[in-house]
Image (cartoon, rainbow, N blue to C red):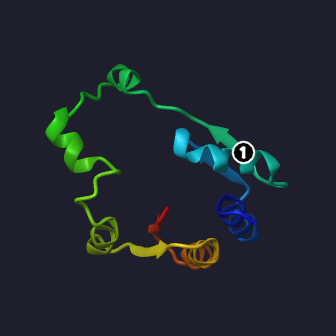
Amino acid sequence: MNGAESLLAALTRNGIDVCFANPGTSELHFVAALDRTEGMRCVLGLILRSEMSNVGVTPGGPKAEALTGIGSPRIDWLSLARAFGAEAFRAATADELSRHIDAGLAIQGPVVIEVVL
């Protein structure tokens, strides 16, 4: 079982049967696993930067993108989540990911799980 399959097994085990996805290149294995997972329905969505202007969102510029970009190594996302009162976990293995998903689904409120690749 790979990480994507482990994630989906934990979700379906906890009664989650719909996944809203915004796939990019790094999520292709997860999207492929969604297609193979019995009892899971995937709703794909894609927001392109050019489409954001259609709903009145203007780009923040390079400084805003550098600050808020999810790929920014300068931001400790777990500490940031905890500062706002969210539970936060880091998973480096498929087993850790599965345990953190189970724990996160048992918690009421937001949860951040950082997956170390």
Q: Position of residue 87 (x, y in %)?
A: 41, 76
Residue drawn at x 28%, y 70% is 84
Mark 1 surroundings within 10 Å by alpha-carbon count, few (fewer than 14), some (14 through 19), many (20 or more): few
Secondary structure beneath dot 1 equals helix
Disc 1 residue type (three-letter): Ala
110 left or right of 102 in image = left
Q: Quadrant of the N terminus?
A: bottom right
Q: Is residue 61 above or below residue 13?
A: above
Q: Position of residue 55 (x, y in %)?
A: 36, 25
Say which residue label 1 marks: 32
68 left or right of 90 in image = left
Residue drawn at x 32%, y 65% is 77
Along the line of sight, the residue nearer the viewer: 73 or 103? 73
Q: Is residue 19 above or below residue 86?
A: above
Given the current orientation, which residue lies at the most extreme front position? 117
Residue drawn at x 38%, y 72% is 86
